[in-house]
Amino acid sequence: MLEDGLLSVRSKTNSGLSGENETGDSARSSLSELEQQRRSLEFELALKCVTVSSNLLTNSKSLSLSALTRALNVHDYPLLFASLIELRPWKLRHPSTGQCYQYVDNGWQTVDQAEFNSGIVKLEGCVWLALYEMLTNSECQRKYEMTNYRKNFLLKLRSHLHETVLDQLSFLVPLRQGLEHMALLEPAPYKKELLLEQLPEVRAAILDKYQVFNISAADFKSQAALWSDTYNLDVLEAMLAEPPKCGACGAPAVKRCSRCQNEWYCRRECQVGHWTKHKPACDLMLVVPENKPNAGAIVEEVKSD
């Protein structure tokens, strides 16, 4: 995708095509051009993010405790930058022509095979410098939770720290020695410390003001009303194949107890006569308040047929 987005060549429309084909080809060409611009923009933004992150991590002493801990253990920048060294997104080889390119000064430049294999661009040097700071700084080592997976992944960097790289970036010699030392030892148990983290007030204020990811009170009410209608007893019981029956005589019922809403009756006489038996179960379903009317007033009025 990267090669297609950054090195693709727009195809020209043949002059002998009809007007309809020319219109279709023009539309496809415009969409293809927009897609290439999107990929190119995303790639450039990603590389700029790498540059900013590497500069921050290189000056880790100026970062707050919470920011450094979050960068190491939450976002795992050591493994992220080690992956960049493996992938080398600042270098590419054209799939069809085999031409080599390097991303230098916000653009792709053609280089020969020797420069492609051994040359180090400025962005790659920034990534190596950030890795050196994170893996050799005592404060970063103390805060970074080194697991077996992280250890094995970081040890892959040894294959990239060959003599050609060390000759150009001599400060990486202690990093190579540290990786060799890491390979001989098991990861030390990580000791978690109490950490007070400052809340992102600016982000919280923006979210509260514009409610980008927040659900409004009206949406909550609408959702509550939807659930209330969905789980309404009348609606659910209306969906049953068998109609409700009177709890006293077994005849088809149209009314139910006004307290528990569970027992059905066909008429008032059945409800009054069945109240003595139904009262214990009704009390279990609903606790009667002190100011509730007596049992005679509780019975729902049912019109006789």
Image: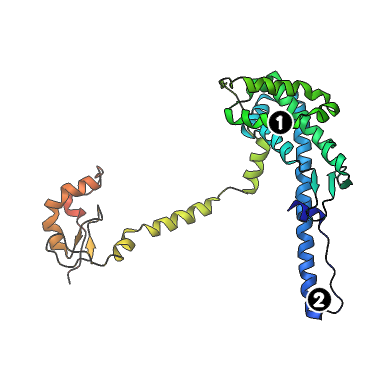
Q: Is residue 162 placed above or below 6 in the rendered structure?
A: above
Looking at the picture, how far across and down is residue 236, in whole percent?
32, 61
Q: CA distance from mark 2 to mark 1?
A: 52 Å
Q: Is residue 209 placed above or below 75 in the rendered structure?
A: below
Horizontally, residue 16 falls left or right of residue 57, namely: right
Quadrant housing residue 10 = bottom right
Secondary structure under the numbered disc 1 in the rendered image: helix
Q: What's under tag 1, amino acid-wise?
A: Leu
| Residue shown at the point (75%, 34%) measured from the top left | 53
User: How is the model colour-coded?
Assistant: rainbow
- Residue 22 circle label: 2
Secondary structure under the numbered disc 2 in the rendered image: helix
Looking at the picture, how far across and down is residue 95, in whole percent?
78, 53
| Residue shown at the point (13%, 58%) measured from the top left | 272
Give the number of marks.
2
Number of residues whose C-alpha sits closer than 10 Å to that of mark 2, classed few (under 14), some (14–19) or many (20 or more): some
Q: What's under tag 2, amino acid-wise?
A: Glu
Looking at the picture, how far across and down is residue 60, in whole percent?
74, 25
Looking at the picture, how far across and down is residue 124, in whole percent?
80, 36
Quadrant housing residue 154 = top right
Number of residues whose C-alpha sits closer than 10 Å to that of mark 1, classed few (under 14), some (14–19) or many (20 or more): some
* Upstream in sequence: badge 2 or badge 1: 2
Query: Is residue 60 visible in the rendered structure shown here?
Result: no
Query: Is residue 271 visible in the rendered structure shown here?
Result: yes
Q: Is residue 231 placed above or below 138 in the rendered structure?
A: below
Residue at which label 1 appears: 157
From the image, state whether disc 2 or disc 1 is nearer to you.
1
Frontmost residue, 56 versus 176 = 176
Q: Are marks 2 and 1 in contact (CB under 8 Å)?
A: no
Q: Quadrant of the C terminus?
A: bottom left
